Image (cartoon, rainbow, N blue to C red):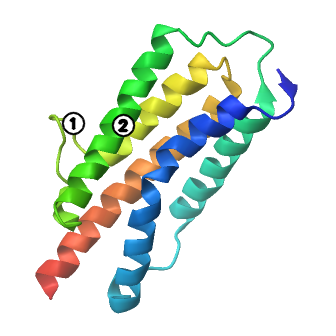
Amino acid sequence: MYLGFSWTGFVVFLLPMIINVPFCAISDNQGKNNKAEKKTSSGLESLEKASRSLYAISLCILISGKQIDYLSPLMFVAALFLILYTATWIRYYRNGCDRKLLKESFLCVPMPLVIFPLVYFVLASIWMNNLISLAFLIPFAIAHGIVSYHNLIEKEKSKKGS
């Protein structure tokens, strides 16, 4: 491994983020209207943010000395999970941004907006021969899964309490 800038790593990280932009804009607008949903950051959320940032940085600046095989089956499987992730978001947007879809399974996979991108990132890191980035991805995966699950449960409880 050596330091440099990896366009491949940048694109690998950026691709799943693009579909999140409309959701962030929608969430920010809804958050302004519903202050009850806005919680202070917990230690777990801080770990999630920090490990995501460290993962992105490591993916973009740590370059393996090994050549990346752009025809590797691993790359195509990673791309499949990216497509599944995108399809899950498209389902959400096409159905009027109904928040109940965020917790519903997609193709029998629970929490698909957590599972699909995490599998994509794991496979992409291995494909890029950047195993160091996995050291940051593992705590992110755990924290992101717990935070996402907690947020879905809290939103459901706040709706029932309203």
Q: Position of residue 110 (x, y in %)?
A: 22, 42
Contact? badges 2 and 1 (CB < 8 Å): yes
Identity, as a three-letter code, of the amino acid under mark 1 = Val
* Residue holding disc 2: 116
Q: Quadrant of residue 140?
A: top right
Q: What residue do we see at 67% from left, 29% from top? A: 8
Q: CA distance from mark 2 to mark 1?
A: 9 Å
Identity, as a three-letter code, of the amino acid under mark 2 = Phe
* Residue holding disc 1: 109
SS state under label 2: helix
SS state under label 1: loop
Q: Looking at the rendering, in which quadrant would you find the C terminus?
A: bottom left
Q: Answer left or right for 110 relative to 118.
A: left
Q: Position of residue 159 (x, y in %)?
A: 16, 79
Q: Quadrant of residue 94?
A: bottom left
Q: Answer left or right for 50 relative to 115.
A: right
Q: Answer left or right for 108 relative to 74.
A: left
Give whichever of 15, 148 is nearer the camera.
15
